[in-house]
Image: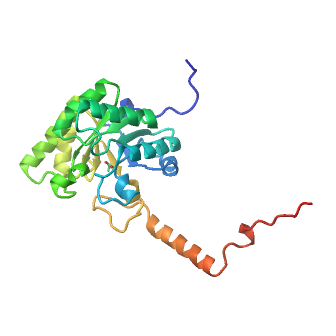
Amino acid sequence: MSKHTDAPRRITARDIATRKGGEPVVCLTAYTAPMASILDPHADLLLVGDSLGMVVHGMTSTVGVTLDMMVLHGRAVMRGSSRAMVVVDLPFGSYEESHEVAWRSAARVMMETGCQAVKVESGEGIADTIAFLVDRGVPVMGHVGLRPQAMNVDGGFRAKGRTQAERERVLREAMAADRAGAFAIVVEGVAEDLAREVTAAVRAPTIGIGASSTCDGQILVTDDMLGMFEWTPRFVRRYGALREAISAAAAGYAADVRTRAFPGPAESYLLKPVD
Ligand code: KIV
């Protein structure tokens, strides 16, 4: 067996699991190698979310995202990072049918990307699958509350917990994922009191998105946080204005090309002729 190198060790599922009630876990989405390399020093966990279907590929939901897409982007994020834990989403249709199908999808994602864990949107019916995967060596992150892959059942992307029945369901989903061995659980689109109740009820750290600061960590879609879109959900805080910055840069480039101000002498080759 080869000796260990001095390369920094990646944060592991176990490290994240021990952060319950401690220093909040910093998570962001990443889909490409350059973005992963920028985020890597700052984030504990990079999620290759199936939100990439909407953010990168212009889809209207995550339902059409394939395992091939997740593998492609997962490999890029692994190449771009060295410190943060990398988790790849199992997309719609790749894990719900049976334990065996889920196992094949998870094993493929882990073997072909080198990522350390997968995430599944975990209604109560998926808890058994989480236990099956964890028992076979796949760390699993759960995802309860607003589950984007269920948008066709829910009638859109709707925050959860308006009725008592819905609140109880979110709580049951989180507790089932926890009992099944999820190392962390994303809690999306729920009010603060429900997020607090879920966080208190589970052993695993909860990672909130639109779920208040009572969770054990937070995640945002990086492109939302950077201000890449004209519209952002109300739970997003913009830490940048990249859309405006990119637009201004493109306008400057276009103006310079049209007036022949670009390229200038500094951007042109001045090659000395050789005999
Ligand atoms: O797909 C995704 O990016 C996600 C996060 C928003 C939690 O599931």
Q: Is residue 47 above or below residue 6?
A: below
Whole-percent x, y for residue 167 in the image = 12, 47
Q: Residue 257 appears in which quarter of the rendering?
A: bottom right
Q: Is residue 255 above or below residue 249?
A: below
Whole-percent x, y for residue 221 in the image = 36, 53
Whole-percent x, y for residue 242 in the image = 46, 64
Residue 225 in view in this figure:
no
| Of 158 and 220, the residue lying toward us | 158
Left or right relative to 246: residue 258: right
| Of 151 and 102, the residue lying toward us | 102
Q: Residue furthest bottom?
A: 259
- Residue found at x 7% / y 47%: 165
Please identify the quadrant where the C terminus is shown: bottom right
Left or right relative to 170: residue 209: right
Q: Residue 123 appears in which quarter of the rendering?
A: top left
| Of 153 and 143, the residue lying toward us | 153
Residue 57 in view in this figure:
yes
- Residue found at x 68% / y 72%: 263
Whole-percent x, y for residue 51 in the image = 34, 52
Q: Is residue 156 above or below residue 40?
A: below
- Residue found at x 31% / y 31%: 103
Q: Residue 215 appears in which quarter of the rendering?
A: top left
Q: Residue furthest left?
A: 164
